[in-house]
Image: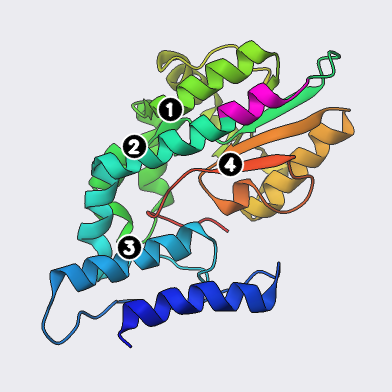
Amino acid sequence: MDFFKTFILLCIIIPLAFGERLLMIELPENLEPRSDGSIDEVRLRCSSWRVVVEANKLSPWKTVPLDCVDYVKEYMSGQNYENDLEIVSNEAEEFAKSVELKGDGMDAWVFDVDETLLSNLDYYSQHGYGSEIFDHIQFDNWVLEGMAQAIKPSLKLYKEVKKLGFKMFLLTGRAENKRTITINNLTKEGFESWDRLILRGDEDDGKTALVFKSDKRKEIVEEGFRIIGNSGDQWSDLIGSYVSIRSFKLSNPMYFIA
């Protein structure tokens, strides 16, 4: 049985055996092609790698495997990525419409910012589509340019969720000193009239993304809000404590944030 068939079989059997427990799979840093050098084989295995990443079944990783850079570039630049974003956003919109709001103004929806509302693909296209170690200084300089573009399916969802009457919480790992540029960038791209924009303060230094976002959701809930929906591109946006009734994971195979 070749690698691809074995891999898919394991993806089906192992989760059934372990139930709801989080399963982490170790994959090699570089995915070696078959002896015949088949491009299709590499693409298949890189496609499988991306599925495992999106399912949060891969042990923490720092960069896209070198053999998969072209695949990730093709995926992020093509129609497949757009289609995946639309499917998730449409599902979130249908869920939002199905919710009967309490009418007390305390039903909330949480949105991540980077790669959820705003796309930094122009930045990552200049930095190997995730094949380079993440450089916080370079990325911060990009953020300060305020050039990130709206993710269109997310903009549509945002407007619909707001129209339905949800309280809008924007929860981002960006630092507090990026507040003004973040507001300007969001507003320029059509995201308006949120209820709260939450960024990392000095008290959040050293916290992982998962702990930071869990802590902030706790504060929201302790104020009496009910977190109905949550949209993010990283699992650390969505899991942990004080999670939403339903969470919606947008595709992003370019980087991993714990």
Mark 1–mark 3 Cα distance, whole angstroms, equals: 23 Å
Give the residue pinned by disc 1.
Answer: 153
Give the residue pinned by disc 2.
Answer: 82
Earlier in the chain: of badge 2 and badge 1, it is: 2
Amino acid found under the numbered disc labelled 2: Glu
Mark 4–mark 2 Cα distance, whole angstroms, equals: 15 Å
Amino acid found under the numbered disc labelled 4: Phe
> Considering only vertical position in the picture, is 72 above or below 178?
below
Quadrant assignment for the C terminus: bottom right
Mark 2–mark 3 Cα distance, whole angstroms, equals: 16 Å
Q: Which residues are magenta?
A: 93-100
Q: What residue do we see at 40% from left, 42% from top?
A: 84
Q: Secondary structure at mark 2?
A: helix
Mark 3–mark 4 Cα distance, whole angstroms, equals: 21 Å
Amino acid found under the numbered disc labelled 3: Ser
Q: Quadrant of residue 105?
A: top right
Earlier in the chain: of badge 1 and badge 4, it is: 1
Q: Is residue 243 left or right of residue 122?
A: right
Amino acid found under the numbered disc labelled 1: Pro
Q: How crowded is the residue under tag 3: few (<14 C-alpha within 10 Å), some, or many (20+)?
A: some
Give the residue pinned by disc 4.
Answer: 248
**Residue 9: x and y, percent?**
46, 78
Image marks 4 and 2: residues in contact by CB distance under 8 Å = no
Q: What residue do we see at 47% from left, 22% from top?
A: 155
